[in-house]
Amino acid sequence: MNCERTQEQLVDYLSSQLTDTEQAALTAHLATCAECREELQTTQRLWQIMGAVPTPEPSPSLRPEFYAMLATFKKEVKNAPDYSLKGLWQRWLSLQIPLPVLRLAYSLCLIGVGLLGGYWLNNKGQEKAADQQQITALAAEVGEMRQVLLLSLIDNPSATERLRAVSYTKELDDPNSRVVNALLSTLNNDSNVNVRLATLEALTPLAQDDATVRLGLVHSLAKQRSPLVQSALADVMVQLQEHRSVQPLRRLLKQPNLDESVKSKIQESIQTLSTGRPAAPSTPSRHDQTISSPQPVRPGTIAV
C-alpha cells in the first residue's frame, strides 16, 4: 500500500469504516512509514478539535418567525394576479358580454388561427423547397470537387494515388468529358497493370450508356500489351456485346508471341460476338487481385 492511498483512508480508519483486510494493511503500512504516522496524528488532533466544537441550538424565536414568514408568503401569492388560462377564462365568463358579440369574437379567432396556420404551412413549404435546392447545389459542388480531385491525382507518380483517383469514379453520378478522357488515357498509357485494370473496371459501367466510352474501349484493344488487360478487355467487349471490337480482336490475335491463354480468350470472345449468342456477364479482373500470368511468359513477350 502506498502513502497516498493510506492518507486517503485515515478518516475511515479512525471511524472504523474499513474492512478487516484494509484495516490490517493500513496498520502494517503505518508501522513502517513515519510520514503516514505523522499524518495520522494530525488527523486525530483535527478529529478531536472538531468533536469538541459545540452544536448550536436553534433560537426560541425560530419557529414563530418561520410561520410568520410563511403566512406573509401565502398572502402575497393569494393577492397576486392570476395569469393562468383558467383564471383568464373565469374573468372572461364573469364579464357581461352579449352573446352575438361572443360569437363574432369566436369566429374572428377561428379565422385568425386559420390564417396563421396557412401562413406557417406556406413558409414551411418554401423553406423546404429552398433547403432542397441548397442540398442539390451542394451535391453538385461535391461532385465537381471529386472530379477535380480525380483529375489532379490521375497523373500522380504514385500508383497508389492513381488507384485512389480511379476509385472516385464510382462516386460520380455524371463524369464530364475531361474525366472520361483522362480515364481512357490512363487505361492506354499507365505503366502499372493494376491501375489499368482498375480503370477498365471503372469505365465498364460508364460504357453501358456512353457511346464515347464504348468506342474508346474498342480502340484501346490495339494499345494493350499486358495479358491480364487484354483478357479483361475481351471479357468487357462480350459483356457490352460490342461487335465493333471483332476486327481489333482479330488483329490482336496476329500479334507475335501472344499469350496462349489470352489467345484462347480472344477466340472465344470473337466466336460469341460473331454468332450473336448472348454471353454470360463477365467482370473484368479487379486491381486488388494478385497479378500472375496463367502460363510462364516466353521470351519475346512484352511485360508491361
Image: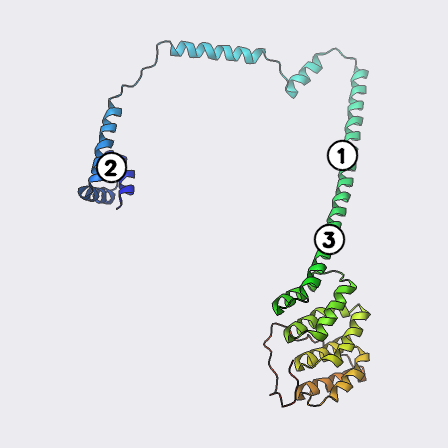
Q: Tag 2 or tag 3, which sits nearer the N-term?
A: 2
Q: Which residue is mark 3?
A: 141
**In this view, 42 is above or below 193:** above
Label 3 with label 2: CB-CB less than 8 Å: no
Which residue is label 2 attached to? 13
Kind of residue at badge 3: Glu
- The residue under label 1 is 120
Q: Is residue 271 visible?
A: no
Label 3 secondary element: helix
Q: Nearer the viewer, residue 186 or 128?
A: 186
Q: In the image, residue 115 lies at what x, y percent?
A: 80, 30
Q: For the view shown, which residue lies furthest in the left direction?
A: 31
Q: In which image quadrant can residue 82 be found? A: top right
Relative placement, left or right, of 15 versus 293 is left
What residue lies at 26% left-to-right and 42% top-to-bottom?
Answer: 3
Could you tell which of marks 1 and 2 lies nearer the N-terminus?
A: 2
State the image coordinates of residue 66 (x, y, percent, origin top left).
43, 12
Please indicate, yes or no, whether residue 10 appears anywhere in the rendered image: yes
- The Cα–Cα distance between marks 3 and 2, rounded to whole angstroms, is 69 Å
The residue drawn where x is 77% and y is 62% is 176
| Image quadrant in which you'd find residue 8 | top left
Q: Earlier in the sequence, mark 3 or mark 1?
A: 1
Q: Amino acid at mark 2?
A: Tyr
Secondary structure at badge 1 equals helix
In space, the residues marked 3 and 1 are separated at their CA atoms by 31 Å
Point out the frontmost of discs 1 and 2: 2
> Could you say which is closer to the camera, residue 134 or residue 38?
38
Image x and y of residue 29, in percent:
21, 44
